[in-house]
Image (cartoon, grey):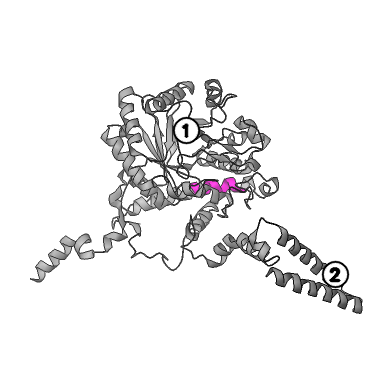
Amino acid sequence: MRDKFLVWGAILVVGTLVVSLLIRAHYWIPILLLCFYLLGLYNITQSKHAILRNFPVLGYFRYFFEGISPEMQQYFIERETDGKPFPRNERSAAYRRAKNLGDTVAFGTQLDINHRKYEGIKHSIYAKSPKEELPRVLVGNEQCAKPYSASLFNISAMSFGSLSDRAQLSLNKGAKKGNFYHNTGEGGISNYHLEGGDLCWQIGTGYFGCRDEHGKFSPELFAQKASIENVKMIEIKLSQGAKPGHGGVLPGVKNTPEIAKIRHVMPGMTIISPPGHSSFSDAAGLLRFVQQLRELSGGKPVGFKLCIGDTKEFEDICVQMNVLKIYPDFITVDGAEGGTGAAPPEFSDGVGMPLEPALIFVNSTLTNYNLRDKLRVIASGKVLTSLDILRAVAMGADICNNARGFMFALGCIQALRCNTNACPTGVATQDKMLIKGLDVTDKSERVYHFHKNTLRTCNELIAAAGRETYEEVDASMFMRGDEFEHLSDVYFPDILGNVKNRRN
């Protein structure tokens, strides 16, 4: 292709130039072709891109179509039930609830409900009337001086830096109006978190916002920030589901001087949090750190967040709780399906335990060590829809956190560009031009409505199942498609046996 380009390109440029000279018009055509030819000559000599060396001009089409392939896939190829990590029908439901529009659909389900992966709720023919009051859960055990009444559904950890200033303002204003908490993420507390919404302040391995000049934990800075009235809970981040065992990443293009000042780091540098904490290195150290933060905060609820990996390590934490008599107020369980702005694909795809088995393991382990009644379990990891919330509660969660659903409420279109600083909706970027497109007044209302309408649907679902309260939600409410595979042997053996006896 290179040889053909050199020969036929030269002939085309010279030929169009001769024709233009003869007719004395349209000189822009040979000039344009000459520019393309010179570009091709450059590409033949460069060594960075093999495609452009072999196809000096046509090779650009490959990069063009690769660049727009996510949009082509989403707008022209995806069906309603396709799309990763969230299918179009779930995103559409989040958009409608955020806009406070009707969230009904027409013509019935598009799911293959005879598939073994199908999950549904067993409704009751004696359905109840749904309650208007949205559910709340008290967080704080006997060692906590300032218990907090939390909503069942809250904003999961997203730092200022990964999200824009207007995104954080919108989330916090929406949380204030809806009376639910806003997790700061590990990036520290910014002014955009202080619009009146309740906060769960997350302390990560980098101790951003409460670190000294050496990057170590600073008790003085922590006590100062923890005394802020909006801070209702403190969460120690051990690991997150999207990249367990890997520190958080703030790309240098997002590390503005303002963000660097909040985090106590140098601006413009890519900031990678350490994989582990420097303040402790074992289960006993973790629990003593929990107690230290509880005392420094004046008795506010303190817990930790983790993605389950080596189950023996969690069992060791439970053993040490009983030995030291130090009990966290909550444990946030993040699933491997959790989201992130930036992670190596091997970590996102191949490390950590999914949320459902993790919840089952955590609850059974806490129960076995007589600890379950001493703390709350918070579920995090693709808990987007009302059905997701109830499924998490059935698996043992007391509270649910979600990040990407609230991003949809802000206008996120799942462009999958969170790590590039080129988020087209101004949500996950620090590009001032893109951020201007996000209207705080409108988006904060959408955050409020998304929360309210999602929990209202939760109330309707448990009422349809004949339950009065969320304490009655358990695994018996749910049915799975694999229950239908051997209908006569598994699902209705007694009933079919009775029918056979009657015939005889």
Instruction: Tell me residue 352's x, y (percent).
Output: 41, 44
User: How far is mark 1 from mark 2, CA to CA?
Assistant: 61 Å
Residue at far left of view: 504
Residue 448 is covered by the magenta coloring: yes
Q: Is residue 302 above or below residue 402?
A: above
Residue 122 visible, this angle: no
Instruction: Tell me residue 372's x, y (percent).
Output: 31, 34
Location of residue 62 (image quadrant): bottom right
- Read off the magenta span: 442-451
- The residue that label 1 is drawn on is 276
Q: What element carries label 2?
A: helix
Identify the amino acid type marked 2. Answer: Trp
Identify the amino acid type marked 1. Answer: Gly
Q: In this orientation, which residue lies closer to the viewer: 436 or 61?
A: 61
Q: In this orientation, which residue lies closer to the viewer: 84 or 138?
A: 84
Q: Is residue 276 above or below residue 1?
A: above
Instruction: Tell me residue 489's x, y (percent).
Output: 19, 63
Q: In which quarter of the image is the N terminus?
A: bottom right
Mark 1 burial class by Cα count in 10 Å: few <14, some 14-19, many 20+: some
In this rendering, position of residue 483 left or right of residue 308: left
Mark 2 burial class by Cα count in 10 Å: few <14, some 14-19, many 20+: few
Residue at far front of view: 3
- The residue that label 2 is drawn on is 28
Magenta span main SS: helix
